[in-house]
């Protein structure tokens, strides 16, 4: 029986830089860091918000990767992942103070409230509100 989504991948060129960004700038916890397979410098790195069931795998890929190389072209673009948070306005201010680039300030839409940021690799991440309340502004 399928119960949850375990991981979602964000493709990166520099795993250490990405790990530092997600842990230090976004405040996520490091769940796992291990060699991808014996004899490689590549790692399986999972980060997640504290208490979250689903983790983000910071997957390093390049054009030579026969299984995942086609994802190298997604680095620095919008990622197919949405992060959920509370109080987007305060979150935006906090992240801005940590040096995170806010691409879209918090905005209310009929489907929900959202904002977007840029990670260490130039990837665009969407952050949605966990409620439909946001101050008018």
Image (cartoon, rainbow, N blue to C red):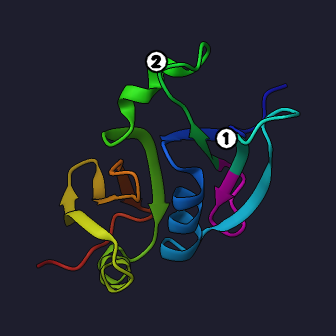
Sequence order check, earlier mark of 2 and 1: 1
Judging depth in this view, the residue of 72 and 89 nearest the camera is 72
Q: Is residue 76 left or right of residue 45?
A: left
**On the rendered image, what quadrant is the N terminus found in?**
top right
x then y, percent, for residue 101: 27, 68
Please tell me whether mark 1 sits on a helix, a strand or a loop: strand
x then y, percent, for residue 25: 48, 74
x then y, percent, for residue 136: 15, 77
Judging depth in this view, the residue of 11 and 87 nearest the camera is 11
Residue 7, numbered label: 1
- The residue carrying pointer 2 sits among few (fewer than 14), some (14 to 19) or many (20 or more) residues within 10 Å by Cα, namely few
Q: Is residue 3 left or right of residue 110?
A: right
Name the residue rendered at 31%, 76% in the picture. Answer: 92
Please tell me whether mark 2 sits on a helix, a strand or a loop: helix
What residue did someone put label 2 on? 70
Name the residue rendered at 39%, 40% in the picture. Answer: 79
- The residue carrying pointer 1 sits among few (fewer than 14), some (14 to 19) or many (20 or more) residues within 10 Å by Cα, namely some
Name the residue rendered at 54%, 31% in the picture. Answer: 61
Name the residue rendered at 59%, 58% in the picture. Answer: 16
Reply yes or no: does residue 47 show up in magenta: yes
Could you give the CA–CA distance between mark 2 and mark 1, rounded to whole angstroms? 19 Å
Residue span colored magenta: 46-55
Dominant SS in magenta: loop
x then y, percent, for residue 97: 33, 86
Q: Is residue 56 left or right of residue 83?
A: right
């Amino acid at each position: 029986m399928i119960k949850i989504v375990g991981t979602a991948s964000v493709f990166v060129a520099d795993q250490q830089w990405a790990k530092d960004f997600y842990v230090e700038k976004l405040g996520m916890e490091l769940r796992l860091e291990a060699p991808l397979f014996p004899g490689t410098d590549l790692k399986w790195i999972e980060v997640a918000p504290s208490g979250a069931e689903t983790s983000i795998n910071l997957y390093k890929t390049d054009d030579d990767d026969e299984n995942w190389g086609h994802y190298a072209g997604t680095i620095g673009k919008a990622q197919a992942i949405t992060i959920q948070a509370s109080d987007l306005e305060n979150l935006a201010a906090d992240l801005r103070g940590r040096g995170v680039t806010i691409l879209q300030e918090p905005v209310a839409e009929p489907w929900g409230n959202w904002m977007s940021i840029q990670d260490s690799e130039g990837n665009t991440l969407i952050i949605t509100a966990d409620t439909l309340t946001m101050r008018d502004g």
